[in-house]
Amino acid sequence: MKSTLISLALTLGCCTLAFAAPPGNVMPSSERPIVRPARDGLMTLSQLFKCGPGFTTYSVKSLSGVSGDGVRCVKFHNTQTIDGKLTGVYWYGEGQWNGKTYRHIGYTYPFAFCPDAGGNCPPQYRSYAADISGNGENSGGEFSNLTLTSLDGNARIRVTGGWNEEWIREPSGHTATYSSKLKPVTTCGPHFSKASVADINGSTAGGTGVRCLASGPDGFFGFIWYGEGQWNGKKYRHLGFTNNFSNQGSGKATAADICNNSAFFCGQTAAGGLNIKQDPTACDANNKFKMNYVVTGNWKERWNGTDSVECPSVIR
């Protein structure tokens, strides 16, 4: 006679695994496995990339048959459609195509600046993205010809122009297959203005970090940045963008942490919860200056520019 099997259930956060044991030989709880080891070629959920609660996580696939995968951590803010193109989209992306790694940030935005028409003109679609490089990445491009088209209520986003790919929303919050192997960011590459970070009083005793700032061809009408470092011994990564940056060099901004696991900070500011003000140094004997920033509101910190710029030019 076949023995009746008793099922032992082990809950692992997202799922239930069933183990079978003969009657009278139930496995003690202290001996039950906590997690099944990953088999060769398979990844556990903890290895898949998660953007965190401040973003919508998308996996990415090529529409040109290029092999590879990646992630897009997308923030929607004042999103609208102009001539069928999606604006108000801000994202951090990384991955690999044909074995070549990349890491970038990008955004699309409405642009309306018509002084000859008294400021009364319809907004135009703009896009910008740039690769962060110098940390082992294999790509270093810059793009201002991307078109983002919404499909199925943003369940998919098609990207054409300089790229040819599709983003697929992941309701689980993690990618389908992608696991990051990129090194930490310590430098930004030629498409960014780089700044180091201190607290509001200029001290780095509590932590350090880097800010990679970039803007599209319209300069003062907004910029985006990627930040990485550590505060009080805990790591952080985030994406931020200005909401409205004036010609006087100040404005509101929003940011959210990219928190792939519990080793990273996992917060986000309120919309427009940061106040950012430019604080340039005086022109030196070589007619150069550096652009610094004072950040208040939800954060209290200083960004000290590392790039020297000709006076009276302005860092965008």
Image (spheres, rainbow, N blue to C red):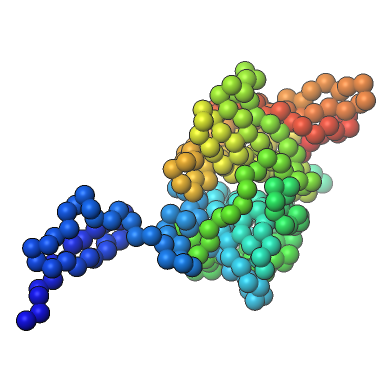
**Which residue reaches farthest top?**
201
Above or below: residue 212 compared with residue 57: above
Which of the two residues, 114 or 230, is positioned nearer the viewer here?
Answer: 230
> Which quadrant of the structure image shows residue 291?
top right
What residue is rendered at 66% in x and 52% in y? Answer: 104
Give how far across and how far down residue 43 sits, in percent: 46, 62
Q: Nearer the viewer, residue 264 or 266?
A: 264
Where residue 159 sits in the image (x, y, percent)?
64, 65
Task: Where is residue 200? Give x, y as percent.
Answer: 61, 21
The C terminus, quarter of image: top right
Residue 151's spot in the image, x, y percent?
A: 54, 68
Residue 220 in sight: no
Residue occupying image coordinates x 47% and y 41%: 263
Q: Residue furthest right?
A: 286
Q: Is residue 96 left or right of residue 134?
A: left
Q: Would you say residue 38 is visible in this rendering?
A: yes
Residue sitting at x 53%, y 37%: 235
